[in-house]
Image: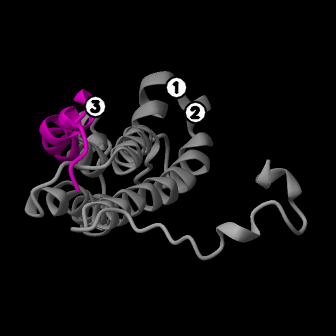
Amino acid sequence: MNRPVSAWRRFTQTVGWPALAAVAAWVGFSRHLVGTDGSHVLIYVLTLVPVLLIAGIMALAVPLRRKQVISARASAWFFFALGWGLVLGLFLPDEAAGPTAVVSVLLGEGWQGAESAVSNPAAVIMVFSMSMAAVFAWLDSRPGGPVRTHDEDHAQGTGYYPVLGE
């Protein structure tokens, strides 16, 4: 499918690779910068970082392998996931004794309670968003393009939501 290539999608194909590597390194080793890396670093490096890298590589490489560019929605999910990866690297705690996340070391012990409260949902959102980027990149770069079925279009505007038909 020939569709015009926007600057945003071209930007994703060129900047996406180093940005993915930087965010994966940030998630895995951000606590090393403030000297609070402990026993959990290995767990993060063996779980969160591979999931982020595998899904991100799929999101960027599948359209390239199919000689297409990444779709707009896959690109949006990709950068949304990278943003949550940056947040995760700031709030990811290491051990329970004292402030260990980057944000609590830099801003004080008052942020210690926010470490787990922010990092847990941030990790879930990051993994989900990068998975969505990979799925949309795979679906949108198929030879026939994105598949839209029209078998239910006749039902729009009926049922509980009649406003959809207008």
Give the amino acid at mark 2: Trp
Q: Is residue 95 above or below residue 22?
A: below
**Identity of the residue drawn at 44% across and 49% down:** 93
Tell me the number on the disc at residue 108: 1
**Disc 3 vs disc 1: Cβ atoms closer than 8 Å?**
no
Q: Would residue 80 appear left or right of 163 to someone viewing this image?
A: left
The residues tagged by marks 3 and 2 sit, at their Cα atoms, a distance apart of 36 Å
The local secondary structure at tag 3 comes to helix
Q: Main secondary structure of the magenta part?
A: helix
**Identity of the residue drawn at 37% across and 63% down:** 146
- Closer to the N terminus: mark 3 or mark 2? 3
Instruction: Determine if the magenta segment contains residue 113.
Output: no
What percent of the width, then of the height, locates residue 55?
Answer: 28, 63
Q: Would residue 38 appear left or right of 122 to someone viewing this image?
A: left
- Magenta residues span 1-22
**Identity of the residue drawn at 24% across and 49% down:** 70
Tell me the number on the disc at residue 8: 3
Residue 125, visible in the rendered structure: yes
Give the amino acid at mark 3: Trp
**Disc 1 vs disc 2: Cβ atoms closer than 8 Å?**
yes
What percent of the width, then of the height, locates residue 7?
Answer: 23, 28
- Closer to the N terminus: mark 3 or mark 1? 3
Foreground: disc 3 or disc 1: 3
Q: Would residue 115 appear left or right of 138 to someone viewing this image?
A: right
The residue carrying pointer 2 sits among few (fewer than 14), some (14 to 19) or many (20 or more) residues within 10 Å by Cα, namely some
- The residue singled out by tag 2 in the image is 111
